């Protein structure tokens, strides 16, 4: 079924088409000058020492774990209210994810207090996810990392150009990871970026993303190298130039896109202000953020109620989603005992409303009105 109002709309136009056409016409389509240009865009926009393009954010997170020296038997603190990739990456290197609850129902990011409680002699790192683009409690988390000698991996998939006290998210920890999956603020179908201020980590990331080879095909094709050595066991985590050229076009639009999303969020907050049955996470946030998604949480609710409300919204043509089914409740992760009441509450009672730059005032009004009506109908029917 095609929804009247989808959850997300691509911000694509002639610019992306032209970018792809030019890359194809250049006759170089795998990792090459477009990936290099995109990396330089990230270095500039994020004011960071280096940026390494990769095939997706999952690869960036996997690399981040390797670069942070995480290995077999180490523990890594991470949220459960996230996408699987933020946690699976810990498993890829043989380490153990230790789930931490979120701070509150208003602040649905990993709690610094929980982090401190769960640190053991085995803890090596913290994976921080900035939900919906809103910053986690980075000052406290950075202090804890320094105190206990831990690395910080920022999964900034939701947060391109989001800020925390004047710093861009993704640049505060040791490594920052971004995704260009189709529903992200910056879309290219697939793609990812790893950023860091650590020169050694950046060099190693470049090696590991392409089989540990000391030169890339493009360098050889353009006469800058004639052979290569393999110095480490690496992977094929490379991005290609076709996607990189789309991401460059998307990065040019990003700031304006985010300004429009901020307006969409303000309209939502206005439209939902008299709804006492819901909480809008991060409602008081004053930072500039990406507004990747528009999450709301039902108050004093249950999973059945949330699912019923979602179905009613769907029948009115409004697509919604859930961010996220908690990772610790998936079969793969049920082996550990966890006590994460706030995560479970949000996982059961969150609804993600449509969010994109071109969402109109009328559409926002329609969504807010529909939500009010379905909540009222649910209460009446009992
Ligand atoms: C929080 C988070 N982390 C990681 C990922 C993985 O990104 P990718 O699909 O580029 O591997 C996603 C993407 O959905 C995400 O939302």
Image (spheres, rainbow, N blue to C red):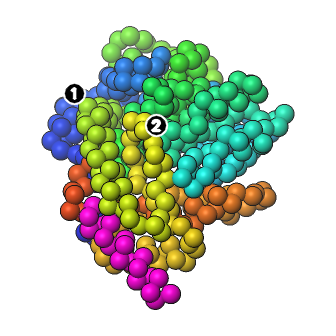
- Mark earlier in primary sequence (2, 1): 1
Spatial CA span between label 2 and label 1: 27 Å
Task: Please tell me whether mark 2 sits on a helix, a strand or a loop.
Answer: strand
The answer to whether 364 is drawn above or below residue 65 in the figure is below
Q: Residues within 10 Å of mark 1 (few under 14, many from 20)?
A: few
Magenta range is 364-382
Residue at mark 1: 26
Image coords of residue 158 (percent x, y): 45, 43
Q: Quadrant of residue 211?
A: top right
Please tell me which residue lies in front, 50 or 236.
50
Residue 18 % position (x, y): 17, 36
- The residue that appears at 50% across and 67% down in the rendered structure is 298
Residue 371 lies in the magenta-colored region: yes
Q: Which residue is mark 2?
A: 178
Some atom of ligand 1 lies within 8 Å of the CB belonging to the residue at label 1: no
Disc tally is 2
Q: Nearer the viewer, residue 283 or 232?
A: 283
Give the residue at x 39% y 17%. Answer: 219
Residue 68 drawn at (x, y percent): 66, 27
User: Residue 54 appears at what percent x and percent y?
Assistant: 46, 33
| Residue 363 painted magenta | no
State the predominant SS element of the stretch in magenta.
Answer: helix
Is residue 304 in view from this perspective? Answer: yes
Instruction: Quadrant for the N terminus, please.
Output: bottom left
């Amino acid at each position: 079924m095609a929804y009247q109002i989808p959850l997300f709309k691509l911000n694509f136009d002639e610019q992306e088409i032209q970018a792809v056409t030019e890359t194809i016409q250049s006759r170089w389509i795998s990792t090459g000058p477009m990936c290099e240009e995109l990396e330089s865009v990230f270095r500039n926009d994020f004011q960071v020492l280096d940026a390494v393009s990769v095939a997706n954010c999952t690869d960036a997170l996997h690399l981040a774990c390797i670069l942070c020296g995480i290995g077999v038997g180490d523990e890594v603190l991470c949220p459960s209210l996230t996408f699987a990739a933020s946690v699976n990456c810990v498993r890829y290197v043989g380490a153990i994810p230790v789930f931490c609850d979120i701070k509150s129902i208003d602040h649905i990011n990993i709690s610094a207090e929980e982090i401190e409680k769960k640190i053991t002699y085995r803890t090596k790192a913290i994976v921080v996810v900035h939900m919906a683009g809103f910053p986690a409690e980075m000052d406290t988390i950075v202090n804890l990392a320094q105190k206990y000698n831990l690395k910080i991996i920022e999964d900034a998939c939701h947060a391109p150009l989001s800020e925390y006290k004047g710093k861009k998210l993704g640049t505060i920890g040791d490594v920052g990871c971004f995704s260009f999956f189709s529903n992200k603020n910056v879309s290219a179908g697939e793609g990812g970026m790893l950023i860091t201020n650590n020169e050694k980590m950046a060099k190693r990331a470049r090696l590991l993303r392409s089989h540990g080879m000391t030169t890339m095909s493009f360098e050889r094709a353009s006469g800058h190298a004639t052979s290569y050595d393999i110095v480490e066991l690496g992977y094929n985590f490379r991005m290609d130039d076709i996607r990189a050229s789309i991401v460059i076009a998307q990065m040019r639009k990003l700031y304006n896109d985010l300004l429009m999303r901020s307006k969409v969020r303000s309209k939502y907050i206005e439209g939902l202000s008299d709804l006492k049955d819901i909480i809008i996470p991060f409602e008081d946030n004053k930072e500039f953020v990406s507004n990747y998604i528009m999450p709301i949480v039902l108050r004093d609710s249950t999973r059945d109620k949330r699912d019923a409300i979602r179905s009613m919204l769907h029948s009115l043509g409004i697509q919604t989603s859930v961010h996220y089914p908690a990772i610790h409740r998936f079969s793969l992760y049920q082996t550990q005992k966890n006590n994460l009441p706030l995560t479970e509450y949000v996982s059961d009672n969150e609804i993600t409303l449509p969010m994109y730059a071109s969402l109109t005032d009328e559409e926002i009004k329609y969504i807010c009105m529909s939500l009010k009506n379905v909540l009222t109908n649910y209460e009446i029917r009992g």
